[in-house]
Image (cartoon, rainbow, N blue to C red):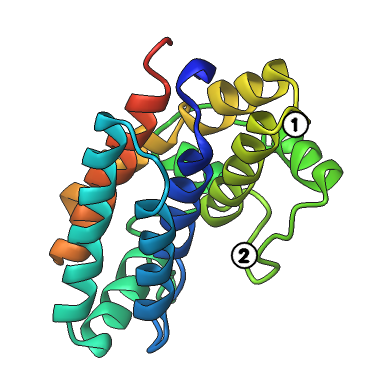
Amino acid sequence: MNIDIITPATALIFKFYTQCFAFPYEEMNYELHNLFRVVENEDLVEDELILADQALTIINLYQEAKISNLRSEYVSLFTSSGSENIICPIVASDFCKLATKRYDPFEAEEYIYESGVPINTDEPVDSIVNYLQYLSYACEEYFIGILDPKTLNSFFENHIVYWIPLFCDHLYRVSNLSFYKEIAVGLKESLLYFGSDL
């Protein structure tokens, strides 16, 4: 991860995408909007302004969509219906099987549990929600000088860029809604920006 470009907005950007992968609910629009406003109030560099614009596009798509359509797409994409496989698994170990990549989430789970960061207990520890939540926390901890760069780089390289950019490509292909397509584009571009020294 390019630690030289981490700012206070970095953690907020990843927190925004964490929230985007929650099951859609009525108040989610306000939560996304509030997060966007907090990001917007930071002293953003030019590239971060582009990432913030993508977040605003996602918020606008959420506002324009029917909540029932968002929920239906969420269930269709990210959950199993009986004997059918999940179209777009949001769990690292499941997605890596789909992408025929070897992956062991044990090390990532250790990072997450040892940090004490609150995780979504409704999801497996290696879900994209928990990984992005930890990444947000780790960027913030690094910026204020608590977390060493080796830990942040290791998590980013071995447990984020290993599968999430592929996940974003897959999500873009299989989703029928612009909301999820834009999440895929925005998240991948954010990862590419912050991982630009890889």
Residue 123 is labelled as 2
Across and down, in percent, residue 19 comes to: 46, 64
Q: Is residue 44 above or below residue 75?
A: above
Please name the residue shown 65% across and 25% down the image. Answer: 152
Q: Is residue 57 left or right of residue 97?
A: left
Residue 62 in the figure: left or right of residue 113 = left
Amino acid type at image mark 1: Glu
Q: Amino acid at mark 2?
A: Glu
- What's the CA distance linking mark 2 and mark 1? 17 Å
Seen as rendered, the residue at the extreme right is 114
| 100 versus 195 height, above or below | below
The answer to which quarter of the image holds residue 62 is bottom left
Q: Residue at x 20, y 54 (%)?
A: 182
Q: Secondary structure at mark 2?
A: loop
**Viewer-closest of 55 and 187:** 55
Question: Is 116 on the left or on the right of 90, as rendered?
Answer: right
Of the numbered discs 2 and 1, the one sitting upstream in the chain is 1
Q: SS for tag 1?
A: helix
Q: Quadrant of the C terminus?
A: top left
Residue 112 seen in this snapshot:
yes
Q: Residues within 10 Å of mark 2 (few under 14, many from 20)?
A: some
Q: Which mark is residue 107?
A: 1
Residue at horizontal 51 percent and vertical 33 percent from the top: 160
